Image: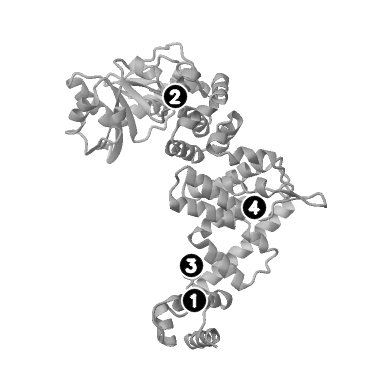
Amino acid sequence: MPNANEDTTPALSQVQRRAVSELLRVSPVADDLARRFQEAGFRLALVGGSVRDALLGRLGNDLDFTTDARPEDVLKIVRPWADAVWEVGIAFGTVGCQKSARVGDAVQHFQVEVTTYRSEAYDRTSRKPEVSYGDSIEEDLVRRDFTVNAMAVALPEKEFIDPHGGLDDLAEKVLRTPGTPEESFSDDPLRMMRAARFAAQLDFEVAPEVVTAMTEMAGRLEIVSAERIREEFNKLLLSAHPRKGLGLLVDTGLAAHVLPELPSLRLESDEHHRHKDVYEHSLTVLDQAIDLEEDGPDLVLRLAALLHDIGKPRTRRFEKDGRVSFHHHEVVGAKMTKKRMTALKYSNEMVKDVSRLVELHLRFHGYGTGEWTDSAVRRYVRDAGPLLSRLHKLTRSDCTTRNKRKAAALSRAYDGLEERIARLQEQEELDSIRPDLNGNEIQEILGIGPGPAVGQAYKFLLELRLENGPMEHDAAVAALKEWWAGQNG
């Protein structure tokens, strides 16, 4: 893969060797597609994130290409070639498809996007980019967000195209823009969030002039739709180093337009955790929650960890003895979480789950040194429901005290609670707690038909089950009849 900058350091040569290896792996798909474009009289190049990731030795099976062919021509070329084709992004010049190909001894599935050379810019009052097509790859690359994403490999000859020094910036692990950052962010303000996201994903530094532009232009984010902001924020939060990206959002003022509750935590000194502020505590809880993940990044857990204390500013009180209290901040925080996540257009299920975790995150601290009754343990499990595993992780992550003895004591107490939960689950099937009598049995025993009374009886029996554990059938019948007599006495 020739490089325009022949005077490279050994580190860059190693980068290029990794890229060649990665490109050879995907060449059964890339070269085949490139030949088809060539035969049709068009040019094709691997571009953007695909080239960056190839240079980093982490190219996956999602491949991005750019071409001088217009979308209708792209469709004619890929339809006979691909296993499936979709046109969701065709208004923006992008055709997507899926292709399976044998790589070595295995068949791999590739997700391919082919985008016509283009330039796009926002109207200052519009949420949608205006797309116009370009005629050269150089014109296309200059409108890319960052230099490390403004490199291409022309196919099938594998000529390396790097007009903006992206390879050098990749080696130095720095994010710069191909043109001025002001022009780039004016074209698409969401790129300011992408800077924070790439810093978090790649562990790169953002160039000072880019940070300055982000700070000065943060208000431009207001024209970007909530859905696009949410998706970019999710990518940041699910990255390898979310703290780095979140810090950049807060420091530049972008967070004020995305998650204003986050920077507000910086002002709230938290006496209980003895951190500099609740903001730092929240980032530490996020880090610790990530360390406890078992099956890859968990967006629900990470959101709950980040947001668990956002109710503290509104509930902060200075007590007479000089302490600071945050009574019921978990309840207030759950409501704030629901409101913010709804504004960012998260799904109803995700809003419900994250809000519930925020609401429950302090419940364990009522456990004390282990004096919970079996009834309290059952209610803890019932209230957490399918979120119990995440609640375990969030509760453990919320311990950020520097006092090792106190931290060890909290850990032992939670170990004890989990052991009790496990024993009760084995004995009583806690995961599916329900009354000892079902609705049909209630109606038959009481001689009533469907109606509110059945629901009231069911609730009574459920509370009895939570309080006392499983009951024999005859005992449950007797308790139900006694309750019913009291209702109609």
How far apart, in angstroms, are the residues tagged by discs 3 and 1? Answer: 22 Å
Q: State whether residue 9 is above or below residue 361.
A: above
* Alpha carbon separation for disc pair 4 and 3: 28 Å
Q: Tag 2, which secondary structure? A: loop
Circles 3 and 1: CB atoms closer than 8 Å: no
**Label 4: few (<14), some (14–19) or many (≥20) C-alpha neighbours in 10 Å:** many
- Say whether disc 2 or disc 1 marks the residue closer to the N-terminus: 2
* Residue picked out by circle 2: 124
Between 170 and 389, the one lying in front of the other is: 389
Q: CA distance from mark 2 to mark 1?
A: 57 Å
- The disc labelled 1 sits on which kind of residue? Gln
Query: Residue 456: where, in percent of width, then height?
Result: 49, 76
Give residue 376's position: percent from left, percent from top.
Answer: 61, 69
Please name the residue that numbered disc 4 is placed on. Answer: 329
Q: Residue at x 59, y 66 (%)?
A: 419
Task: Name which quarter of the figure residue 214 lies in.
Answer: top right
Circle nearer the viewer, 4 or 3? 4
Up the image or down, 358 lies above or below 89; here it is below
Contact (CB < 8 A) between labels 4 and 3? Answer: no
Front residue (pair 326, 29): 326
Residue position marked by numbered label 3 in the rendering: 431
Q: Which residue is mark 1?
A: 456
Question: Mark 4 or 2, which is nearer the eye?
Answer: 2
Left or right of residue 219: residue 158: left
Q: Earlier in the sequence, mark 1 or mark 4?
A: 4
CA separation in Å, label 1 and label 4: 31 Å
The structure's colour scheme is: one colour
Q: Earlier in the sequence, mark 4 or mark 3?
A: 4
Location of the N terminus by quadrant is top left
* 334 relative to 421, above or below: above
